[in-house]
Amino acid sequence: MALTLFAFDTPNARKITVALEEMGLPYTVQVVDITQNEQFDPAFLKISPNNKIPALLDTQGPDGQTQTVFESGAILVYLAEKYGQFLPAHGAARVASFEWLMFQVGGMGPAPGQVHHFAALTHEGDKRYGLARFMAETLRLYGVMDRRLAHFTHFAGELSIADFAILGWVWRHPRHHVDLQQFPNVQRWYQAMMARPGVQKGFAVALRKDG
């Protein structure tokens, strides 16, 4: 197969499995076990210079050459543009797709990711300040999304890579300590997304070596 996804069971990797399944693309998975520091393997560094998952290898890239892509947002754009799916070709919907993709990459990922970190600490003094700070920002971001979805079925109006990107993180809302009932429009969108066959296939992909 032309496409190989290097991944582990994280929100950023789930964005890509969902996108690949929704696009109906054949691909193989190579699990990079970040709990065993496999992301620091020199061979993986050649594919992902930042030592982060996910990463993509396409043996049928531009001009027939092998192409590697790191950073989940870049992978989504690469796939959408190459295969002509889930990214409007022009107009306001294209702008909105990029806006909400960048919203996820720059905010609705880093902030709840910090919640994950501080919530897992056992020493109350260590986690109190950080958890309060990033929990407040995470709730603010959910509010931004809820207001958007009060007027649109999907973030760009039509289904796009922005939805796949954001879904990977809303999937972890229990770890964010967020009750989606507080954000009914996000909850409606989330339930509709998770009911899609392609999304379900994306989340069923084994991204752990014991999975």
Image (spheres, helix red, strand yellow):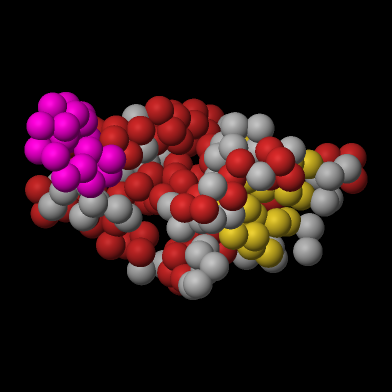
Q: Position of residue 71 (x, y in %)?
A: 57, 37
Q: Is residue 163 visible?
A: no
The answer to which of 113 and 60 lies nearer the viewer is: 113
Q: Is residue 112 magenta?
A: no
Residue for point 10% across, 48% down: 182
- Drawn side of residue 60 relative to residue 132, left or right: right
| Region rendered in magenta | 116-138
- Drawn side of residue 194 relative to residue 145, left or right: right
Return the residue found at the far right: 64
The answer to which of 208 and 178 lies nearer the viewer is: 208
Residue for point 23% across, 46% down: 120
Q: Is residue 129 visible?
A: yes
Q: How many numbered circles are shown? A: 0
Q: Is residue 128 magenta?
A: yes
Residue for point 13% across, 52% down: 179
- Drawn side of residue 65 relative to residue 159, left or right: right
The answer to which of 207 and 21 lies nearer the viewer is: 207
- Drawn side of residue 139 relative to residue 61, left or right: left
Quarter of the image with the N terminus is: bottom right
195 lies above or below 111 = below
Q: Position of residue 110 (x, y in %)?
A: 35, 33
Q: Position of residue 84 (x, y in %)?
A: 66, 47
The answer to which of 196 and 211 lies nearer the viewer is: 211
Residue for point 23% across, 51% down: 175
25 lies above or below 164 = below
Identify the main secondary structure in magenta.
helix
Q: Position of residue 61 (x, y in %)?
A: 81, 44
